[in-house]
Amino acid sequence: MNIIGPQVKALRERQDLTLKELELKLNSLGWGISHTLISKIEKKKRKVSDTELVYFCEVFNVNPIQLLNGDSPFPLKV
C-alpha cells in the first residue's frame, strides 16, 4: 500500500507547486516520472518504491519518517 500519497500532496501544496512543477523537479534529480503518475501516488493508486521515496525526500527536503508517518502527530517541516 502507498501511505505517503497524502503527505506528498500536502508538501506539494505547501510549497505551492503544481503537479507539473513537481514533475520537473523530480526529473531534474534523475527520476523520469510524469505528473500523471505523481497524481496517482497522491491518490494512493500507485505504490512507491524505496528509491522513489528518496527522491521525494530530496525534492521536499524532509526525512523518510516524515513521509511515512502521514497520520502521526509529528509535524511536517517544510
Image (cartoon, rainbow, N blue to C red):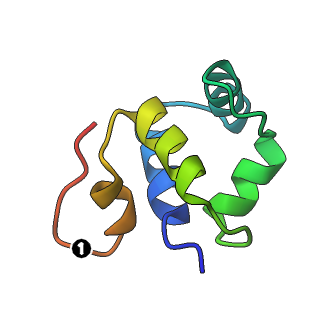
Q: Is residue 15 visible?
A: no
Which residue is pictured at 47% across the width and 31% down the height? 59
At horizontal 44% and vertical 58% (from top left) the residue drawn is 7
Residue 38 picture location, percent across and down: 70, 49
Q: Nearer the viewer, residue 51 or 6?
A: 51
Q: Give left or right: position of 10 versus 73.
A: right
Q: How many badges with numbers are in the image?
A: 1
* Residue at the limit of the structure toward the top, as seen here: 28
Image position, residue 75 (x, y; %): 19, 56
Q: Classify residue 14 by image quadrant.
A: top left
Residue 25: horizontal and vertical position, in percent?
61, 24
Amino acid carrying mark 1 in the image: Ser
- Relative to 57, is 17 above or below? above
Left or right side of 71 for 47:
right
Vertical arrangement, residue 41 with respect to residue 29, above or below: below
Left or right: residue 64 versus residue 6 is: left
Dot 1 crowding, Cα within 10 Å, few <14, some 14–19, many 20+: few
Quadrant location, the C terminus? top left
Image coordinates for residue 50, horizontal then vertical, percent: 53, 57
Q: Residue at x 65, y 18 (%)?
A: 28
Residue farthest bottom in this picture? 1
Q: Quadrant of the N terminus?
A: bottom right
Q: Secondary structure at mark 1?
A: loop
The reply to whether residue 10 is visible in this rendering is yes
| Residue under the point 61% across and 60% down | 49
Which residue, given by chain and number where applicable, does mark 1 sit on?
A: 72
Q: Is residue 6 above or below residue 62?
A: below
Q: Which quadrant of the figure has residue 18?
A: top right
Q: Residue furthest front?
A: 51
